[in-house]
Amino acid sequence: MNYCSQCGGEVALSIPEGDNRPRFVCNHCGAIHYTNPRIIAGCLPFYQDQVLLCRRAIEPRYGKWTLPAGFLENGESVADGARRETLEEANATVELESLYTVFSLPHISQVYMFYKARLLNLDFYPGEESLETQLFSFSDIPWDELSFEAIKQTLTHYFEDRSLGDFPTHDAVIIPPAR
Amino acid sequence: MNYCSQCGGEVALSIPEGDNRPRFVCNHCGAIHYTNPRIIAGCLPFYQDQVLLCRRAIEPRYGKWTLPAGFLENGESVADGARRETLEEANATVELESLYTVFSLPHISQVYMFYKARLLNLDFYPGEESLETQLFSFSDIPWDELSFEAIKQTLTHYFEDRSLGDFPTHDAVIIPPAR
């Protein structure tokens, strides 16, 4: 950030009075510009003993398998965002059953939130951001070709919880492995 | 938003190619400026059969009772934000037990997330943003003096769930009543 989005003046990092961390503050009008983590809302669509994955047609992780998900928009509930992304990326219609996984990724200031969602029919097909959409049983999941750790952990929880017949909300932090 | 935070040029609302909603786009450098919902992270601190509430020393809802909570910061997990706010507003040290309530407030583009949190000692006292901090039993909760609907619903769930001995994660949308 270089300029104030309100008045166009130059901004500089400083700690506002009563605050305890540096913010971009406008040298001209004094506006304080906060930036905050973003939410990625998505679904784990299931049908009988299978789950629906999408193969990414966009970077990052082009060509990898993922769950339908994307940035929550202003004016949307998390549930509405999850349904919208599932429709956009897989043209899939789902009924949300419960909030299933919540992952904080503090290193990139993101929070993933996935709903367990019943696929209402099999008329899904790839949206613009997907190369393929396909149902997978546990034994067929392309574990080494998944896009993100949050996807892997959501799928792992799901197949474990299925065997137990209980699907509590899982909440965790994902930190990248040290190099 | 009037000016581009990157180059200082004027911005205007338009729908970028491949997108489907209006964004602020810079007329000069072409940067697209997204805005997204913000997360409010907090705790429901409990001690035996009581819960800890804070009386707000700030607007909005000055003087009303609330749970310690505030905007999640970049670089923070939701759990870390919840612990930090509890420390800042009530100087209370807690052990998080589970993610307990998640509320979408689409009309103000906010998502509240509260953890059920065991109060580790009784050495709490008001932080700068609180007038008072106090433990309340169910029968003493100032139901008509609570700050926000999300607080009321979190407390209601808690005392119901306590009687059942099970504390699943609750996820809901809060929409303001029609006028």
Image (cartoon, coloured by chain):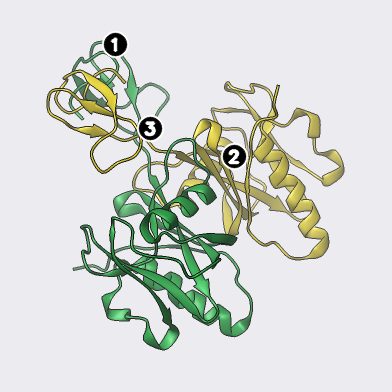
Chain colours: A yellow, B green
Residues at marks 1 and 3 touching, judged by CB atoms closer than 8 Å: no
The answer as to whether the residues below labels 2 and 3 share one chain is no
Residue A68 at x, y = what percent?
A: 59, 39
> Which is more foreground, mark 1 or mark 2?
1
Residue tagged by mark 2?
A: A68
- The CA distance from mark 2 to mark 3 is 17 Å
Q: Is residue A53 visible?
A: no
- Give SS at disc 2: loop
Side of B156 where B116 appears, left or right: right
Q: Residue at (48%, 70%) from the top-left corner?
A: B122
- The CA distance from mark 1 to mark 3 is 21 Å
Q: Quadrant of residue A95?
A: bottom right
Tell me the kind of residue under disc 2: Pro
- Give SS at disc 3: loop
A96 and B31: which one is in front?
Answer: B31
Q: Residue at (27%, 76%) from the top-left corner?
A: B145
Compared with B148, A65 (above or below) is: above
Residue tagged by mark 3?
A: B20
- Give SS at disc 1: loop
Q: Is residue A148 visible?
A: yes
> Which is more foreground, mark 1 or mark 3?
1
* Nearest to N terminus: mark 1 or mark 3: 3
* Host chain of mark 1: B
Compared with B156, B70 (above or below) is: above
Residues at marks 1 and 2 touching, judged by CB atoms closer than 8 Å: no
* Host chain of mark 3: B
> Which is more foreground, mark 2 or mark 3?
2
* Host chain of mark 2: A
B106 and B89: which one is in front?
Answer: B89
Residue tagged by mark 1?
A: B29
Q: Quadrant of residue B178?
A: bottom left
B4 and B177: which one is in front?
Answer: B4
